[in-house]
Amino acid sequence: GAGVSQSPSNKVTEKGKDVELRCDPISGHTALYWYRQSLGQGLEFLIYFQGNSAPDKSGLPSDRFSAERTGGSVSTLTIQRTQQEDSAVYLCASSSGSSQYFGPGTRLTVL
Amino acid sequence: AQSVTQLGSHVSVSEGALVLLRCNYSSSVPPYLFWYVQYPNQGLQLLLKYTTGATLVKGINGFEAEFKKSETSFHLTKPSAHMSDAAEYFCAVSPILTGGGNKLTFGTGTQLKVEL
């Protein structure tokens, strides 16, 4: 079946602009996670959704970062007023048990 | 808090040789344990996991790992390396939660190079 998909695969933006990153999880997976992978910080957790609710937002680095999930499916991660330190690969994962399945990621470059 | 230590950011082996990638974790209670592989410009692929039961777990592509509680380790092995195994490998842990929220804490990764 179809895996986790993410769009866009690459995004280049200018400092100060807002960006939206999209994640389509595996059908039927109720849990959805966002992670960030950067050279300096490695792989770090951002936010977790169970259905449309986000019981754990502890990894969001600042209030410029927000995320939502609708219909228990698609999720959007929004970064407002992007900064150069936001440049990273943003990974989405979904799960229905203990295993998380990752999408290919969105590479964000902030100029 | 949980943490993961991967010894050796770069490991080089000859094709056909044993692969051993080390992972140690720190957790107040034994967590779930995972190994993921990442090929260039791709996402993470689950190799194997330990949740409960048999401490020696087998995964895809001939990899296996053994959970040793006394050593807080979960080392990844493969008897014979293949060129296609060249990639970055991440060890990860998550808390054991029945209601979800099993967020992963990753190690810093080990880049495996396989030489002819």
Image: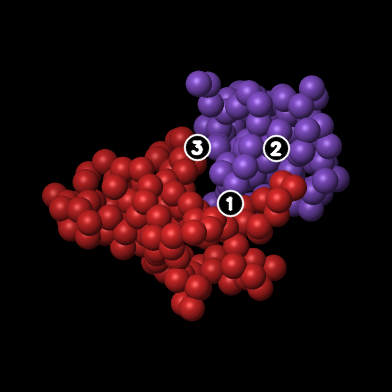
Judging from the image, mark 2 belongs to the subunit labelled A
Q: In the picture, which chain is red? A: B
Residue A29: give x, y in percent of width and height.
66, 31
Q: Residues within 10 Å of mark 1 (few under 14, many from 20)?
A: many
Judging from the image, mark 1 belongs to the subunit labelled A
Under circle 1, the secondary element is strand
Q: Residues within 10 Å of mark 3 (few under 14, many from 20)?
A: many
Under circle 3, the secondary element is loop
Q: Answer with the quarter of the image where residue A20 lies.
A: top right
Q: Colour of chain A?
A: purple
- Look at mark 1 in the image and give the residue it sits on: A43
**B8 or A5, nearer to the observer:** A5
Q: Amino acid at mark 3?
A: Gly
Residue A84: tell me if it is visible.
no
Q: Amino acid at mark 1?
A: Leu
Q: CA separation, marks 3 and 2?
A: 18 Å
Q: Is residue A69 above or below residue B84?
A: above
> Which is more N-terminal, label 2 or label 1?
2
Q: Amino acid at mark 2?
A: Ala
**B43 or B94, nearer to the observer:** B94
Q: CA separation, marks 1 and 2?
A: 19 Å
- Look at mark 2 in the image and give the residue it sits on: A31
Residue drawn at the location 82% of the way across and 41% of the way down: A54
Q: Nearest to the eye among marks 3 and 2: give it.
A: 2
**A4 or A17, nearer to the observer:** A4
Q: Is residue B61 above or below residue A10?
A: below
* A99 left or right, relative to B28: left
Residue B7: give x, y in percent of width and height.
42, 69
* B6 left or right, relative to A36: left
